[in-house]
Image: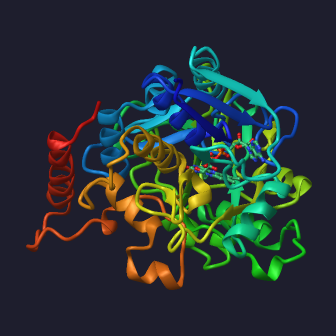
């Protein structure tokens, strides 16, 4: 008899899970509401669309995202394989051509003989089992209500998107290509500001009109994707120590040092579109035009996509989910992706893979907590004491791993030791 699995949501977690299960011989029914019903952030009909940045972060082995990538590759990851195939230069980060990436994931999933994609909005948790709910942070309202009913209230925070501008509209007499400290190729386009230019930009940003929310006073933003104006409001120079930091970015010809540098990263492999790194915003559209055009070199910027901000829903996973992403008390129901309170593209994909892995390996109780995947699952399952009280979505970081048992002063060496220790666990694990 065919082994069947039902998946709600064809995003990063849903596609990762569907592909893994299909490769293991499961017949997958994948429900995706787009293009019939769109979310506020997705722009295409493709499965696996990235909604904001086109970066899947660092590939360096001694970074947390580097370790997560290595672990995912050991199990087999459609998301990472596809990213590799359509990467664009971005120093040591893995950045992709957004459209090629989504098309790649879409065609791998839709063309798999074991996967049937059904373009339909699910308005309730299906009764079919096993079932993975991976409807993401922008889960449609009816479904979100049902999930809230079942799990007793929902939680949320706000996520912001950065604007994208056309390369042709940048004044190349002012902009220059360079990577910070010349690490990697000259992948970033940089726009330097002196103190006076920064002050003009800063004041305009602070005074700009922002989109108001009904529950604005409860605005709860995720630190990793904080709107630029929120960050700026923390202090006059916060940006110059954050996304606009000028260190390692002297002008390559004049050697000029800047007070602040805005970096632009390629959005597509042709290099016709660039996003303003760190400039996610909730400024009104006409204000985005006015304020960002104050940056030297962007006077005539043509906006291909404006920045925006969206509500991001997640469940209180601790107390509801096991390390295997199974629902406690309904073990054939799984949740995966950002809706579980993991944060980030890779982490969302990772949780989809973990849920699928749990279905294929019924005796699986979770990866070792010294691994990135194990630590992430531990965070979600509430085995971290503080999470039981106040649960905050998180991407994977080394702070989630148990200590090394000795003090290591060299930070790079310490991270390398964490990574080596994590990867050793995979030598003893059934990865097939
Ligand atoms: C505005 C915003 C910006 C973000 N920016 C970044 C970023 O820059 N970097 C980063 O690492 N992470 C970012 N994230 C966080 C997160 O990594 C992404 O949201 C990621 O796509 C989550 O993966 P997922 O599979 O959980 O959800 P998604 O990729 O959103 O997939 C969920 C899918 O389910 C579908 N769906 C929803 N409801 C239903 C339904 N009822 N029936 C059927 N289908 C349904 C949706 O259409 C969607 O295709 C951002 C999140 C938001 C909301």
The image quarter containing residue 330 is bottom right
Q: In the image, residue 411 lies at what x, y percent?
A: 20, 63
Between 61 and 27, the one nearer to me in the picture = 27
Task: Judge from the rendering whether residue 344 lies leftward or rightward of residue 399; answer left or right.
Answer: right
Q: How is the image coloured?
A: rainbow
Identify the residue at image location x=31%, y=62%.
398
Task: Judge from the rendering whether residue 21 lies leftward or rightward of residue 237; answer left or right.
Answer: left
Between 326 and 143, the one nearer to me in the picture = 326
Which residue is situated farthest in the front direction here? 1
The image quarter containing residue 427 is top left
- Give the number of marks: 0
Task: Judge from the rendering whether residue 394 lies leftward or rightward of residue 119; answer left or right.
Answer: left
> Quadrant of the image for the C terminus?
top left
Which residue is situated farthest in the left direction here? 406
Identify the residue at image location x=70%, y=48%.
127
Q: Is residue 408 visible?
A: yes
Identify the residue at image location x=87%, y=40%.
37
Q: Is residue 190 visible?
A: no
Tell me: residue 393, above or below residue 120: below
Between 68 and 129, the one nearer to me in the picture = 129
Between 270 and 429, the one nearer to me in the picture = 429
The image quarter containing residue 237 is bottom right
Q: In the image, residue 132 lies at what x, y percent?
A: 59, 46
Identify the residue at image location x=54%, y=82%.
390
Q: In the image, residue 116 lies at what x, y percent?
A: 67, 23
């Amino acid at each position: 008899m065919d082994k069947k699995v039902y998946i709600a949501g064809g995003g990063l977690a849903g596609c990762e899970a569907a592909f893994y299960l299909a490769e293991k011989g499961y017949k997958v029914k994948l429900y995706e509401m787009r293009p019939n019903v769109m979310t506020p952030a997705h722009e295409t009909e493709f499965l696996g669309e990235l909604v904001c940045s086109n970066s899947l972060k660092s590939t360096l082995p001694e970074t947390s995202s580097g370790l997560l990538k290595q672990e995912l590759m050991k199990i087999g990851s459609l998301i990472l394989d596809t990213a590799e195939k359509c990467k664009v230069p971005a120093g040591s980060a893995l950045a992709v051509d957004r459209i090629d990436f989504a098309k790649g994931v879409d065609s791998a999933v839709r063309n798999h003989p074991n996967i049937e994609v059904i373009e339909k909005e699910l308005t309730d948790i299906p009764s079919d089992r096993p079932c993975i709910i991976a409807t993401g942070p922008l889960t449609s309202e009816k479904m979100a209500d049902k999930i809230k009913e079942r799990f007793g209230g929902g939680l949320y925070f706000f996520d912001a998107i950065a604007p994208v501008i056309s390369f042709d509209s940048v004044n190349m007499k002012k902009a220059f290509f360079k990577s910070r400290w010349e690490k990697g190729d000259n992948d970033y386009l940089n726009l330097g500001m002196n103190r006076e230019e920064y002050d003009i930009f800063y004041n305009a940003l602070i005074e700009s009109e922002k989109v108001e929310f009904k529950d604005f006073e409860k605005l709860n933003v995720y630190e990793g994707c904080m709107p630029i104006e929120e960050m700026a409001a923390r202090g006059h120079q916060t940006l110059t120590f954050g996304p606009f930091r000028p260190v390692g970015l002297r002008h390559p010809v004049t050697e000029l040092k800047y007070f602040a540098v805005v970096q632009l990263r390629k959005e597509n492999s042709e290099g016709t579109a660039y996003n303003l790194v760190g400039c996610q915003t909730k400024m009104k559209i006409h204000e985005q035009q006015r304020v960002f055009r104050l940056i030297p070199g962007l006077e005539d910027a043509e906006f291909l996509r404006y920045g925006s901000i969206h509500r991001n829903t997640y469940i209180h996973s601790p107390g509801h989910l096991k390390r295997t992403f199974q629902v406690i008390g309904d073990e054939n129901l799984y949740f995966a992706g950002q809706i579980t309170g993991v944060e980030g593209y890779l982490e969302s994909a990772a949780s989809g893979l973990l849920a699928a892995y749990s279905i294929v390996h019924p005796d699986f109780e979770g990866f070792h907590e010294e691994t990135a995947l194990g630590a992430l699952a531990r965070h979600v399952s509430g085995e971290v004491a503080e999470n039981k009280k106040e649960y905050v979505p998180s991407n994977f970081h080394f702070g989630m791993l148990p200590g090394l048992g000795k003090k290591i002063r060299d930070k790079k060496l310490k991270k390398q030791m964490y990574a080596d220790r994590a990867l050793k666990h995979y030598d003893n694990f059934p990865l097939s």
